[in-house]
Image (cartoon, rainbow, N blue to C red):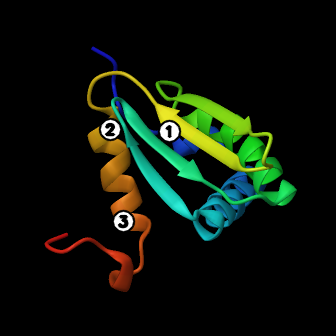
Amino acid sequence: MTSLVCNLGSFDTSELQRYGQYRHAIRAATQETRELADGYGLHLGTASESFLAAAQWIVLEHRCCPFLNFKLELTGASDVWLSVTGPDGVKAFLGEAMQRDRSPAQRLPGA
């Protein structure tokens, strides 16, 4: 079984700051969240900045959470989609992380 534990200690201070900035940029750009069988898909709008921030975040995120799989897509309509998936348990793990990241007004009822 794959361990679903993030290792933020793999970052130095500068990397940790950039990681937080990219994560914030992704949260701010997310226009739609789709549930996938083994994770989530995020529509990040059409801005090239969203694509670049997501790509830079993926590089760092993979270092601290190597059990995650990523797919970054730029469609013909210039839509940016980020999919984050993984082994059993990842969907619940990601759902909890996304719930913590939401402001209290955005949280789902009962969370």
Residue 83: image location, x then y, percent = 55, 38
Q: Determine which residue is flagged by label 3.
A: 100
Q: Residue at x 43, y 42 (%)?
A: 40
Three-letter amino acid code at the position of disc 2: Lys
Of residues 69 and 15, the one drawn nearer to the viewer in this rendering: 69
| CA distance for labels 2 and 1 | 18 Å
Three-letter amino acid code at the position of disc 1: Asn
Three-letter amino acid code at the position of disc 3: Arg
| CA distance for labels 3 and 1 | 18 Å
* Label disc, if present, on residue 7 of the rendered structure: 1
Of residues 17 and 88, the one drawn nearer to the viewer in this rendering: 88
For marks 3 and 1, give the one nearer the viewer. Answer: 3
Q: Determine which residue is flagged by label 2.
A: 91
Left or right of residue 3: residue 44? right
The residue carrying pointer 1 sits among few (fewer than 14), some (14 to 19) or many (20 or more) residues within 10 Å by Cα, namely few
Residue 96: image location, x then y, percent = 30, 54
Q: Residue at x 64, y 45 (%)?
A: 81
Q: Judge whether 107 appears above or below 90 on screen.
A: below
| Mark 2: secondary structure | helix
Q: Residue at x 80, y 49 (%)?
A: 78
**Quadrant location, the C terminus:** bottom left
Residue 61: image location, x then y, percent = 61, 40
The residue carrying pointer 2 sits among few (fewer than 14), some (14 to 19) or many (20 or more) residues within 10 Å by Cα, namely some
Of residues 5 and 46, the one drawn nearer to the viewer in this rendering: 46
For marks 3 and 2, give the one nearer the viewer. Answer: 2
Q: Judge whether 89 appears above or below 87 on screen.
A: below
Q: Earlier in the sequence, mark 2 or mark 1?
A: 1
